Image (cartoon, helix red, strand yellow):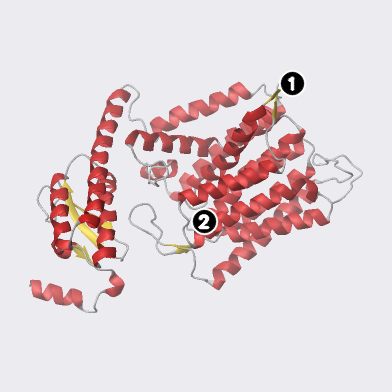
Amino acid sequence: MTDPTTPDLLNWPMNGVRLTRLDAALIFGGAVLVAAAAVFVVLKLNLGIAMDAPDSKRKFHEKPIPRLGGGPIFLTLCLGAIAAWMMGAVQWTRWLPVAICNTLIFSVGFVDDLKPLGARVKLVGQLGTAMILYSMGVSMDVLSSPFGEGSISLGWLALPLTLLWLVAIPNIVNLIDGMDGLAGGFGMFLCLTMAFIGHYQGQPDVAAVSLTMAGALGGFLIFNLPPAKIFLGDGGAYLIGFFIASVSLLSSNKGSVIGALLVVVIALGVPILDTTFAILRRAIRGVPIFRADAEHIHHRLILLGYSKGRALVAMYTVCLVLSLAGISILLTKGLALPVSGAILFLLAVAGARYLGYVRSFGNLRQQLRETLERRRVREYFRARGRVLDFEVERSADIAGFESSFLHAIDRMNVSLKPGADRVETRLDLSSGRMLVLYHPADRESPAEWRMRLDELLPSLEGCLVRWHALPDCLTGNLIEPESTATPGADDSRRAATA
């Protein structure tokens, strides 16, 4: 770090260490180069692990793409932190808890990228990591007001509020990681915002480490912007979210806790709104909260006719505006809070209407009634699916299960044969085959019917496990994977038909 003799906007004394504009540019630019080089090496190695395969529901990329983007980002962050320590900008006694816990949370996500752990295991890992950070002294024990003097001691609430903060933000970032460049770009804006918080509160270490993370995400985005060549994966998404959450807590120790956290909350406005919409949407519809769907904000923008690039620019713009609105809270010592809150509220109302979550505020009651009716139908399908699960265990042979299966789909108004008033839906089996079923041509969307019919899949997978076969009635409705199709089979089938 340099020690200039002239005043500088980015001159923040801390134990004699000063960070200049040039230092900031070198940190950010160096991190971009290191991360880009690391991602390039990962892609060139073509390891063939942690591949994200496309499907017909939510993932529309053309070929499998590696979910290893968290590795280069983590490596760059580590190298940057070590360099900052060697230059005296980072004190390990202050940063060791954050370093350990960010490593732990990255490990949880990265292992899940290699071999799925399940939602419960990941949640335990997140809570455990948050508990470790709390026990090492990084927490929100006292809330000091951004409006001036005065503070509130949280007492026993410190633990649950700290855990909520440290667990919620990584999951919010992971939830929006559904479009090329989205989570990485949001993370970069948030880390630049964290760097400003470090500047404003006289903490060059916070600024240096945050700039390193922002640069790492910038280098990653070179390969993650549409069309993406690599994905963040859970490792990268968890690392971004936990980094923002933990560093915001650390930076708030020297200033207004409420002010520092409010900046992050306002800047995270789009992901928080997206998460809120998702929770409300799934709760009202009776869908598990953690079940992925294709109705996030970026999905809705694409349905409205936006290209991926335009949708990304639109969301980046909103994120930038909200980041500036959050920063204004610190600059005005809380006076801009009502304005920032109003902006976030208006964004939520306008977004709900424009994106189609609410068709009309005047007919909101009717829309809610239709949604609840759809939920009851979905619960009926789920109950039928659970009964079929038990039938796999109770049936003496596959013929007995077949009888139960035919009765269940008849009650669901689903057929194995096409008809003039029937629509085809294909369900993906774990063996790579697809099962073709036919449902009524009603007002419901194909995605809604696919979600309902997915309730049949666990019992069919159970058949494959117990009897290594599917009921004979489904033979004519199975489509074999293309890779196992016999050459010339299509020609022979066409000839036989002729």
Q: Tell me: 414 left or right of 383.
A: left
Q: Secondary structure at mark 2?
A: helix
**Residue for badge 1:** 148
> What's the distance in space between the residues labelled 1 and 2, CA to CA?
41 Å
Q: Amino acid at mark 1?
A: Gly
Give the residue at x 30% y 66%. 431
- Residue 90 showing in the rendered view: no
- Circle 1 crowding by C-alpha within 10 Å: few under 14, some 14–19, many from 20: few
Q: In the rendered view, would you say 377 is above or below 471?
A: above
Q: Position of residue 113 (x, y in %)?
A: 50, 59
Residue 95, given in percent of the width and then of the height, sits at 75, 48
- Numbered circle sitting on residue 229: none
Residue occupying the point 18% across, 41% down: 442
Q: Position of residue 452 (x, y in %)?
A: 26, 46
Quadrant of res 8 = top right
Identify the element where label 1 is drawn.
loop
Q: What's under tag 2, amino acid-wise?
A: Gly
Mark before the other along the chain sequence, 1 or 2? 1
Expressed as whole percent of the image width and height from the top left, the position of residue 392 reads 23, 57
Q: Is residue 392 visible?
A: yes
Q: Is residue 114 left or right of residue 404?
A: right
Q: Which residue is mark 2?
A: 233
Camera-nearest residue between 474 and 243: 474
- Which residue sits at x=60%, y=41%? 166
Q: Which class describes the residues within 10 Å of circle 2: few (<14), some (14-19), or many (20+)?
A: many
| Up/down of 461 relative to 448, above or below | below
Quarter of the image with the C terminus in it: bottom left
Identified at 24% across, 78% down, the residue is 486
